Every structure is written in C-alpha cells, then in structure tokens.
Image: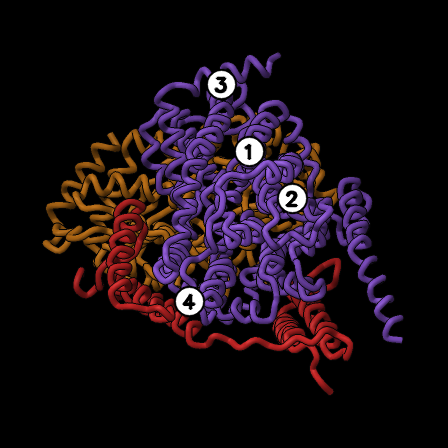
Amino acid sequence: MRIVRQKDFVTGLLYIALGVAFAVASYGYRMGTASRMGPGYFPFWLGVLLAAIGVMVLWGSLRLHAEPEKLQRWAVRPMLIILASVFIFGAMLETLGLVLSLIVLIVGSSLASPEFTWRSTIINTVALIVFAVVVFVYSLSLQFPVWPTFIAG
Amino acid sequence: MELFDNLMLGFANALTFQNLLYAFFGCVLGTLIGVLPGLGPLATISMLLPFTFGLEPLSALIMLSGIYYGAAYGGSTTAILVNLPGETSSVVTVLDGYQMARQGRAGVALSTAALGSFFAGCVGTLILAAFAKPLTQFAFKFGPAEYFSLMTMGLVGAVALASGPLLKAIGMIVLGLLLGLVGTDVASGVMRFTFGLPQLWEGIDFIVIAVGVFAFSEIISSLESKEIRETFTEKVTNLRPTREDFKRMIPSVLRGSAIGSAVGVLPGAGLSLASFFAYSLEKKVSKTPERFGKGAIEGVAGPEAANNAAAQTAFVPTLTLGIPGSATMALMLGAMIVHNIQPGPQVMTSNPSLFWGLIASMWIGNLMLVILNLPLVGIWVKLLTVPFKVLYPAILMFCCIGVYSVQNSVFDVFLAAVFGFFGYGLKKLDCEPAPLMLGFVLGPMIEENFRRAMVLSKGDFSVFVSRPISAVLLAVTAALIIAVALPNIRNRREEAFQEG
Amino acid sequence: MKYVRYALAAAAMAFTTTAFAQQFPSKPVTLVVPFAAGGSNDILARYLGDNLSKMWGQPVVISNMPGAGAAIGSAHVSKAAPDGHTLLIASVTFTMNPAVQKNLPFDPVKGFKPVAMIGKVPLVLVVGKSVQANTVQEFLTTAKSKELAYATSGLGTVNQFGAELFAQSAGVKMIPVHYKGGSEAMTDVIGGHADLFMSSMTQALPLIRGGQLRGIVVTSQERASVAPEIPTADEAGVKGVDVEQWWGILAPAGTPDNLVTKLNADINKVLNTEATKEYLARDAGRPTPMSPEAFGKLIQDELAKWKDIAQKADIKAQ
C-alpha cells in the first residue's frame, strides 16, 4: 500500500487520536441522555464524530487516484528557538521581572533569524524594552514586576 | 419627525468642544490599545473608568464609547497587518485581510475596513435611533431554542471559512467545538478536560489560542524559508482602493451592514457571529468564491461592516433595558451608575438629553475614527517595511505581554506556546485555523443553549421546530447543507464513473 | 453618633496597638480581587482602596486575579505573608463554593482570618411574562400547579442558592436553568423563556420600575429601602429566608490580632461615612460594618447553611 496524500494521512491520524482522546476522557463524566444531557454527552459524541472524520480523511488519502501530496519538512530550529524563548519569558516573568524576561525573549527569538546580527538585536532589544516599560508599565499600569522581586523587595 | 427632533437634541448636547475632545481622545486611545493584542476594550475601559468619575456623565460615556469603537477598529488593524485576530470578530478579517497585506495591498485593506466600518456605523446608529424599542422586542423572541438553531446555522456556514478540502475543515470545526468545552460546564458545574489545573477551570481564553495558531505559527513559518525575507510583505503598491475595488466592496458593505445590524441586537451571541455570517454570505453570493482566502476585498469589506454595525446595535439591549450584551457593555453601564444614572428602560424618557446625546456621539465617534484612521493607514503600512528580523521579536513581545495581561497568568503564556506548536503543525498539514476558532467560540454556546432548551421544554425535542423563528433558522440550515453537499456528491459520482 | 463612636474607638485602638501595627502599612498594600476588572467586587475594591490609601498614605494596589471562579485569587491570598499587606475582597459566593466544588485549592476557614464586612445588597425574586403572579401567594399557587424553572447565573451561585432556599422554605419544587451570567439569565426571564430569577436588587430594580419584571419578594430580614413596596419572605409567611449578596475583606491565616483590629477599624471608618452610604445606595446596597469576630461567625454560619441547602437540593458538580 502506498500513501498517496501524506498530509491527509497524518491529518486523519491526528483527528482519530484527538477524537478518541476526547471521547475517552468524556466517558469519565456523567453521560445522561439526549434530552437530559450530562456533561459527558456532547463532548463524547463530538469526539466520536472527530474520529469518524479522521477515518474518512485517512481513507481518502489512500485512494490511488488521488493527487499525490508529500509532507513538508518542519523548520525545527526556528520553531524550537521561538517557542523556547516564549516559555522562558513566561517562567522568568513573575520572579525576575519584565525587563530581564524581555531581554531573554527578544534576544532569544532574534537568534532564529537567518540574518541575525548582535548590533541590530541589541538596538532592537533596548528600544522595545523602553517602549514596553513606558507603555505597559507607566501608561497602562498593567500589573507585573518590572525588576527582580529580590532586588525590588 | 420625532426622531429628527430627538437627534437634534442629541447633537446639540454632544457637539460641544469639550465632548468632541473626549470623543477624539477616546478614539485615539481605543485605536492604539486595540492594536495591541490581548488588551481589548474591556481592559482599557475598566482601567479608565476611575478617571471618568470627575467628568460630566455624557462626556464620560462619549469617551468610553470612543474607546469601544476605537478598540474594535484597532483589532482589525492587527488582523490585517500581522495575521493576529485580537478578538472573535476579527478572525475572518485575517482570512483575506492578511492575504491582501502579503500582496502589498495592506493599505487598501485598511482603508476598506475604515470606510466600510464608517458606513456600517452610520447605518447601525440610525437603526438604533429609530428602532431601539421594536428591536428589543425582537431580541426577546430569542430563547434557548432559537439561539441553538442560530448557532447551528452559524456552524454550517463556517464551512465557508475554509478554502481547502471540506472534510478537513469540518474536522477543524469539530476540534474547535471540543476545545471550547474545556473548563467548567455551566449546566453541571463539572470541570471538563482540565487535568486538575485550576487555571483551566474557566476555559481557554480566545486570545491564547489566537496568538498560538495565528501569530506564533505564522512567525515560525516565515522564518523557515531559505531565502532571507527582508520585510513582512512584498512591495506595497497602492494605499487607496481603486475604482475596481470600490465596485467590489460597496455591495459587500451594504450586505454586511444589514446582517450586522440584525444579528448585533442579540445579546451575547450577536457581536461575535455578525462577521462570520457576513463572510459566509459574501462567499455564497460571490460569482468567484475561489478568490476568497486569497485576498478578496469583499472578504474584508463585508465582515468589517457587519462587525461595526453590530457594535452599534449591540447597544440596544444595554440602552433600552440596562441589560449588558457583553462584558464591555456591563462596564459602560457601571459608568452610568457611577454617574448616578440608573440605566434601564427609563433612561430614554427620564434622561433624553443623555440618551440622544450618546446616540449622536456614536455617529461622531465613527466619523472621528475614519478621519483619524485614513491618515494612519500610511503609518501602519510603513510598519510593514520594517525589516522582518526587527519586526517579529516585537510582535512576539506584544503577544506575550498581551496574553499574560488577560488573566495576569504565566500559565496562559505557556499555553499560547503550546498552541503555537500545534498551530505550526496544523499549517504543515494544510489544516486551516479559522474554522477551528469559530468552533471554539460556538462550542459552549451551542451545548448550553441546547441543554437549556431541553430543560425548559421538559425534554421535548419538538421545540426546535414548533417555535417559528427556530424552525425558519433550521430550514435555512438544511438548505445550506444541501447546497454544500450536492456539488460534492455530484463530483464524487463523476469521479467514481471515471474510475470505473 | 455612630460615626463619632467608631472614630473614637479607632483612635483608642491606634494608641493601644503594638508598634508593629502602628507601622502598618509599611509598604503598598495589595487588595486582591479574584475576578476580572469591571465586576461588582472590582468596583467596590477600587472605591475602598482609594479611601484607605488616602487614610494610610500608602498606595492600595488593586490586583485582579481572575480564574477558576474566585479560586485562584483566593488561594493566592491564603498563601500570602500574613502581614496585612495582602488582602482579599470576597463575596457571598466565597461561602457557597465549598458546598458545591470539591478540590478547592484553599480552605475557606483555616486559610483566612476574617477582617471586615463591607456591605450587603438584598436579593429579589422577579418573574417575567411566563408567570402571571403579582403576590407571593399567587406565585406559590402557580409554583405548586406546575414545576417552574428558575434561571441562575451558574451552578452554586447566590442566585441558585437564593432560589433554592426560598423554594425549600416554601415547600415547592423548582428546577434550575443555568446561564453563563446574570444578564443572559435576566434576558430570558423577561422574554418569558425561563420563569423566575433570584436577582440582586441592583440589576432588577430598573427592570421592575420599567415594568419588564415583577418583584415578588425580597430575601432580606427587612424590606429594601429602594423598593419598600415588595414584602419580605418572612412577612409573606415563608419563614427562614435570609440571604443577601455581601462583600467582605479577608486576610491570610496567621495575621496578628492587633493588625486585624486596626484594619477592621480603618475599614469601618470608611464605611461609616455618608459618601460610602451614598456610594452603596446607588447599587441598592448599604454598608454593614461588623467586628472581625462577628464577620467570622457569619462566614462559618453561612458555610454550614449552604452546605445543608446544597445537600437537600442536590446542588453539586456532577
């Protein structure tokens, strides 16, 4: 058997997996009946429906006469850099404050660009931090620590 | 001619230099804040509320409603420029607006949004002024059964949001419905799919998913291309719509204004559904539906008009009854109470200068927005010429801060990153995020209204067809399904014959 | 007179408390609102915070910590340093949540030290066009002839408990229809889709005045000053109905007693001004200053009461 449409094949698998997962999780809640639905009823049947759609998409991807379509490569490096910068920003924000977290976020994410230079990144970082502090902290007085809590006390 | 007299009274009250200044200030502030993701009108109005305590009641309301429109308009700007819908209603603006921006037509898209919104705002204001009372009665006709049928229609229409294969889009809608159910189930109090995390008890916030699947995934996939991408978009061509553009957008704006005015009256559901309905309609009536999703100007004009018309008529229940249609409206009511005006059915008669003054100021606010925004278009478009490597860390920063500030919770920032991964994966599989977002918004509402209808009818399914409005809506839904299914079945058959 | 007495008491207290309390507040005080900005808790907190910061000469920062009902903000305060610089504004639902939700991330009794009661707003039972009744008797006749559906703004909210308390006291059975918020619930009662709503007086009053809804009965011990024509449940022969929306201030457990006394005195000072009275009257409410002990007892009593009601009416997350 040859998988003609690889993207649809994976989509089908994804729908089946998510549908089954939601249906199984919903089974733990009270089901009830259609006229007196419990919390499990609606998500259970939606999960079943999603899995069924997954099967249909999967089936369609195997038909020989379908237009062939290949999976694309993932850009793993920029993805990891961007998402890791966001994660670290979140992890630092409440203890180390906005300024340090933004340095990590901006410098970190800039590394993902193929045309990264330290010069422009540093200028960008300083400008954005000044902007963020002026707009978010002073003008809009949003609630977050600006400096590390152990310094600011 | 009573209406005319009333409007004159309104303009006489609203058109003072001071009030115009507040309207202007509100619109500027609203626009600037609306552009920042995560900071909607709700956050802004609640922060500014204390500052308005010292103002005249009418001035305070004029400024706050300026913020409200400004923020709604600013949200579309972000949607068009950087592929990030800041609120439910701008999900569809992303579809064609961002594509237009990619083709260098960001200026045209923004101008279209501004002009369409202005026109629809005028229509909405007039409707509000003339028909506030009967519209209220219309809104009361909508019970749980009607809402359920309306949303089912919305779901079927959502298929129109997809430009790719139908089946995959339906899968995304269903997945969206499921994601929308995360959190406390209103009818039973059970926490569903929360993995024991209290941060998920109230569900996933819209902006968390939007930032993840739209903004983050767009940035990642922009970074992957081998050739260096200088700026976010190709060369910016023209700023203003051409004659051809106007010809395309005018009927869309008219249809959008009509649909938005009607749907906006319904509290709760109206504001988020208006632009979806308008987009589905535009694609249905278009002779060239294949252009949608690839930068069709009608796909920006119709929904933007609908959204703004709905933003006006959403004031109907708030003004005539004192019942807020949304959290933002609740704050506006709070502002009235603070100024010793008891909102409610009496405002119209007991405080006519305020009521009509506010209506007049809505029109003024809309005019101000268009005057303010047309010159701004040039500046926004300039932003797109900033080198991409400088722009994307800035977008990331605004997204992260915006996501955090919704609930002051870093958990949401983590969750947005997870959705960024998920969204990037979906992109690689050619699964479109817009149907997912609509499912996400509609999911809990559909379930809640269905269950409410069942409780109220004591388990009798016939309510959905025995109540006239609900029956009509379901009939339209059925017609839509047939219209979508027929060509598909025919195609299948033809394929089958060819194979055989 | 009352004002003078409280002022004197506060002055006396200020002299007798220890140095620790005299230095309070030594830094900005955070008042945690466990909901998003814009709700009744938030507006009240901003008013109170504004007045307290004028009195203390230190800013009172309003910190919105929404999420999980009020659980995230409440849990945060219960774990904060017990030095009076982190406080929680809680409402009546604080005593109701434990009756319906298991696994709350805080203990409503052991996690907190009650500081001060702020004020109360009565509830009023309103009906729309689906119920023809104008008096309590007519209403009860209807309720006995068919099962009425009462709207709530969510499971385990004050609207549901209020309606259940009334139904149980009157000996009728009604079924809940849950909505995501008070506005949706109210709209459906006006439209005649749901039958009744136990609303806070704040939201119901303009609609009663406008004729969209009829007020049948109030749930406070005395008639509401803003709508004196509506009888109390007690007067109408339905005994034991006493439920009001209230707001109060709590500190983390372990906060020193003298500090609690000072906080209580300062808050009560704000409550006993004409300005506060007027401020709350706009929302059909009234300030109800209490000692920390009385407030603590009220919380304990209500916790027990709602647990009992929840059991009888089978209100629980299921």
Chain letter for red?
A
In the displayed structure, would residue C205 be above or below residue A153?
A: above
**Mark found first going from the N terminus, 2 or 1:** 2
Q: Which mark is residue B10?
A: 3
Task: Provide the secondary structure element on which disc 1 rests.
Answer: helix
Which tag is nearer the camera, tag 2 or tag 4? 4
Task: Provide the secondary structure element on which disc 2 rests.
Answer: helix
Amino acid tagged 1: Gln
Which colour is chain C painted? orange
In the displayed structure, would residue A28 be above or below residue C180?
A: below
Q: Which residue is mark 4?
A: B228
Tell if the residue under mark 1 belongs to the same chain as the one under mark 3.
yes
Q: Which residue is mark 1?
A: B312
Amino acid tagged 2: Ala
Crowding around mark 1 (Cα neighbors within 10 Å: few <14, some 14 to 19, many 20+) is many
Crowding around mark 3 (Cα neighbors within 10 Å: few <14, some 14 to 19, many 20+) is many
**Mark found first going from the N terminus, 3 or 2:** 3
Q: Position of residue B42 (x, y in %)?
A: 44, 44
